[in-house]
Image: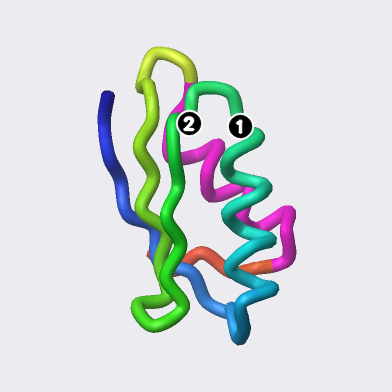
Amino acid sequence: MQTTIIKIKGMTCMGCINSVKTVLEKVPGINSAEVSLEQAQATIHYEPEKTGTDQFKQTIEDAGFEVIN
């Protein structure tokens, strides 16, 4: 298992956090995702043979948020 942190722009409330967490947890290969409004980031624990950071970034952007590189 690997862990990655992705910075996210555009989250303003608990609803945003829940939205990001929900879409990430639906991605096959993600074991868990913690989303922080204060730190503006998602910490994702995943299986690298099943998924990767490009998929996470696309999923977050599809949910209406901006990924910061």
For the point 26% across and 31% down, which residue is it?
2
- Residue for point 59% across, 78% down: 11
Above or below, comparing residue 14 to residue 45 in the picture:
below
Residue 40, image x, y percentages = 42, 75
Identified by mark 2, the residue type is Ile
Q: Is mark 2 on a helix, strand or loop?
A: strand
| Residue 53, quarter of the rendered image | top left
Which residue reaches farthest top? 49
Residue 47 in which image quadrant: top left
Quarter of the picture holding the C terminus? bottom left
- The mark found on residue 30 in the picture is 2
Q: Is residue 52 shown in magenta?
A: yes
Near mark 1 (Cα within 10 A), the count class, few <14, some 14-19 or many ≥20, is some
The residue at the point 51 percent across, 64 percent down is: 67
Measure the C-alpha gap from mark 2 to mark 1.
6 Å
Element at badge 1? loop
Percent coordinates x, y for residue 62 in the rendering = 73, 54
Give the class, few, some or many, for how many residues have Cα within 10 Å of label 2's Cα (few <14, many ≥20): many
Q: Nearer the viewer, residue 46 or 49?
A: 46
33 within the magenta span: no
Q: Mark 1 points at which residue?
A: 27
